[in-house]
Image: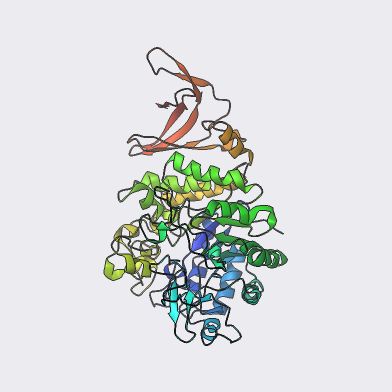
Amino acid sequence: MDEWWRGAVIYQVYPRSFQDTNGDGIGDLPGITQRLEHIAALGVDAVWISPFFKSPMADYGYDVEDYRQVDPLFGTLEDFDALLRRAHELGLKVMIDMVMSHTSNRHPWFLESRSSRDNHRADWYVWADARPDGTPPNNWLSIFGGVAWQWEPRRGQYYLHNFLIEQPDLNHHNPAVVAAQLDEAEFWLERGIDGIRLDAIDFAMHDPALRDNPARPAGEPVAHGLRAGTPYARQVHIHDKAHPDILPKLLRPLRQLADRYGVALLGELSGDGQLERAADYTRGGRGLHFTYTFDLLSCPFSPRGLRTVLEELEASIEDGWPCWSFANHDVIRPLTRFGGEHASGELAKLLPALLTSLRGSICLYQGDELGLPEAELAFADLKDPVGLTFWPESKGRDGARTPMPWSADRPHGGFSEARPWLPIPVNHLELAVDRQAVDPNSVLAKTRRFLRWRPGTAGVAHRDPTLSRRARADPDARPAPRDADAALRVQSRPDARGVYVAHGGRAGDRPRLCGREGRTRHQAARLRCVFRTGHRGERRWLISRCATCARRSATPR
């Protein structure tokens, strides 16, 4: 198998917001085809396309009514085939986004399943009797609010929905369901796709005994990606998802199918124990090829916060494979999440550099290459059911889903000739692709340079398993780069002078001394050559870090 996915940079496209070609204000598959050259010019390896299947759009495509049909909003199967051909001509792999944990409540499987308790698909979904008092069978909750059970009068039972009521959960303990899902995947594999991203795949297997989730102990931190204080975060989610049978019953058959076609499986994991599952599901070639979690999508932006996530996974993943991301269609854009409402342009340049410097594979979400901040939307503009339900405590996910700004001066940023389904903020137009493409100092230009740098850099695109062992042995140690000409260091300073991104730190640089604590002179770590961009242009600095007291100093050159 061609292991193109190892160390790959995967660009996520949210179809509704990428490019509209038919004037309805909603992006479509021909629009993605039209803009593939932009994606290819970035230097990425693959494009992941969020769901474009036939859907009632209760959750904007993640509620699938027919896995084999393109929703008319996005085009036709022929449009997808044309997209696939053009992507391959440009050297891009194509990954589709399959939602296997649940379907729409309009899917024919569910319509049949709900009709009676003895039909052909009666146990294709998770059904349960009410308790004697008529309440749901256990304490499981929905991520989108409320209980995770909905009463269905046709059957006189409850069905499970971990997300919206319109998204009933499939029962993958039933081999017939797994076989049907494999058939749906094979339909697209036969068309020539190169990989599948599996949405919320750890929700695909529940505890068949339907045991209650335990309460989260007082003071125990919630998992990354959960909002503290919500009812959902007050439980430890060990029975409503990620049952151990998911590996033998679902992931292994999926892997066997993928290996037969030579394609890659990328799994999305979340919630309690997500890093442990990332390791478990990818080790030994027994399940997914690689996974990403919500840890970097929600962790504190600090050296300690980032390092804790990286080391926790490295400590257990063995021969498994990680994929890292700071952004997707479900979370606040990283520039705003990490830098606040007034985040600097320098942070916007740092984030793609930091992401592309991580060992493993990475996902880059549309607009990250432009340094787009989270869009501020009025309540009247919201479409996301999360925002509509939880406003104003949560504004939902629409702020990360606004259309791509292609042209600063064209109507609606060049995205559409009609009013877009979500408004494009004025500050996004100022960051449009056409403006940044001609500015060598722009976020777009910097991102392209880092993506060109990444493939030839030893130890970055391909993981070094000795990294975590060295880190655990000496938490303050910084491993010397294998290639002195391609070493990357990211240093954050605790003061207002901003963030330094280092280029070309050399293993042979001589140590410096610091004068901390009176006349005591501590030996410092090796020098790093860095560049800092400011109002007066780019200036070269030398950064040293004391090996004894950890004090850092910056000396202009």
Which quarter of the rendered picture does the C terminus lie within? Answer: top left
Q: Is residue 73 above or below residue 408?
A: below
Apparent side of residue 154 relative to residue 462 in the rendered image (left or right): left
Q: Is residue 529 above or below residue 125?
A: above
- Residue closest to the far top: 519
Q: Position of residue 292 (x, y in %)?
A: 54, 55
Apparent side of residue 37 relative to residue 190 in the rendered image (left or right): left
- Labels in figure, total: 0
Can residue 193 be seen here? The reply is: yes
- Residue closest to the far front: 132
Q: Position of residue 97 (x, y in %)?
A: 54, 67
Apparent side of residue 43 relative to residue 228 in the rendered image (left or right): right
Q: Position of residue 286 (x, y in %)?
A: 68, 58
Q: Position of residue 24 (x, y in %)?
A: 39, 78
**Of 514 and 396, the residue lying toward us:** 396
Which quarter of the rendered picture does the N terminus lie within? Answer: bottom right
Q: Which corner quadrant of the image does residue 145 belong to?
A: bottom left
**Of 457 and 465, the residue lying toward us:** 465
Q: Which corner quadrant of the image does residue 543 belong to?
A: top left
What colouring style does the render use?
Answer: rainbow
Q: Residue at x 50, y 68 (%)?
A: 32
Q: Residue at x 50, y 53 (%)?
A: 325
Can residue 441 be seen here? The reply is: no
Q: Which corner quadrant of the image does residue 261 belong to?
A: bottom right
Q: Residue at x 64, y 67 (%)?
A: 250
